[in-house]
Image (cartoon, grey):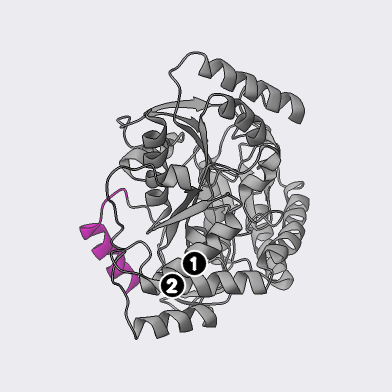
Amino acid sequence: MTDDLLGRHRSVLPDWLALYYEEPIEITHGEGRHVWDSEGNRYLDFFGGILTTMTAHALPEVTKAVAEQAGRIIHSSTLYLNRHMVELAERVARLSGIPDARVFFTTSGTEANDTALLLATAHRRSNTVLAMRNSYHGRSFSAVGVTGNRGWSPTGLSPLQTLYVHGGVRTRGPYATLGDDEFVAACVDDLKDLLGHTRPPAALIAEPIQGVGGFTSPPDGLYAAFREVLHAHGVLWISDEVQTGWGRTGEHFWGWQAHARSGPPDIVTFAKGIGNGMSIGGVVARAEIMNCLDSQSISTFGGTQVTMAAGLANLTYLLEHDLQGNARRVGGLLIERLRAVAAQVPAVREVRGRGLMIGVELTVPGTDEADPRTASAVLEAARRGGLLLGKGGGHNTSVLRIAPPLSLTVAEAEEGAAILEQALRSLR
């Protein structure tokens, strides 16, 4: 059945639609932190549908909310009042840290970033945007135009003029050998120099921790230092929290809070985990920015009743069960466990991350040369051992991405670490 499904997939879907594994699997159901494939194999899920399953698979509170709402009405569009949408917007606005916040719901992180770019360029009357090297912001035409990762940029055409600055990757590039303070200072000087050679940009869009780029991040405070420079030029700061939001980093509810010295971003985008698999994205911005558009707009499917009901139930569960705290505690143990393993595996260049957002970078031993074949081999070995991982990295997809549901237990973290250790040791 799996082989037949794979053949049908290849005959009707695009060649560029990626599939994991030499023998792709069909996931049929899940519960908690585990999923099963169509052949009955059980896996510990350390990737959560690309960071979307934030709380747990088949979480009763969410499935009940979806079923009950679907039994009443699934959708009516934003042309009508929607109680669930208003209630979730109120909660997100309060949690955002942005004063006088307004919230607009979309169906994905890509669409959220599109909206943020539209707002910033309209508000600033500029189509120049600053972005980070190694970044990823989605697959739409405008989102690809601000993505600084060659592997995810299928075209050089764009409606935007994008200029890339240093800072998103701490351990590579021209400033990698500097100490943290010197690294920040060098990146700020680079930003100042860039601003002296271009027309005033609309905004800087940045992921506090780069997701597809391999869970890389700058030292704490970099974006606060950037914001001081940006503010002096009237340039907006868009924090792309599609992967870092909702407490995944453990230490903070939003990734930008590691860079909060100069205040919150002007715009925050979010998606993925808030829906726990349901299609929710959105934008939070100050009212003057959100309301700057001079024409009408709607979102046909953004904020639909059934997804909003899921988001409310999921956010309530997250907060009431302190899953941010769990990510900090269990994620901290998992990172230290993996670092102890990595110290004995020459192919592991670095184990990095925060909370339950962890990257394991693989290179040719003794060098900084990315080793995507080894990363794929470990991915395969982990699957055979019953563990699902992700891949990423701006240097030829050589980073294993670990992002399980935030309800992960200590026992499950140890189980996953043991399987990954065995997969890594199989490289010898």
Residue position marked by numbered label 1 in the rendering: 88
Q: Bin the neighbour count of mark 2 within 10 Å (Cα to Cα): few under 14, some 14-19, many 20 and up.
A: some
Residue 301 position, x and y percent, is: 31, 63
Q: Are marks 1 and 2 in contact (CB under 8 Å)?
A: yes
Residue at point 66% right, 65% down? 416
Q: CA distance from mark 1 to mark 2?
A: 6 Å
Q: Is residue 317 left or right of residue 159?
A: right
Q: Amino acid at mark 1?
A: Leu
Helix, strand or loop status at disc 1 = helix
Q: Is residue 194 left or right of residue 291?
A: right
Which quadrant of the figure contains the N terminus? bottom left
Q: How many marks?
A: 2
Residue position marked by numbered label 2 in the rendering: 84
Q: Amino acid at mark 2?
A: His
Residue 294 position, x and y percent, is: 30, 42
Circle number at residue 375: none
Q: Residue furthest left?
A: 12
Q: Is residue 375 left or right of residue 157?
A: right
Point out the stretch of residues depicted in magenta.
1-16
Residue 91 position, x and y percent, is: 55, 64
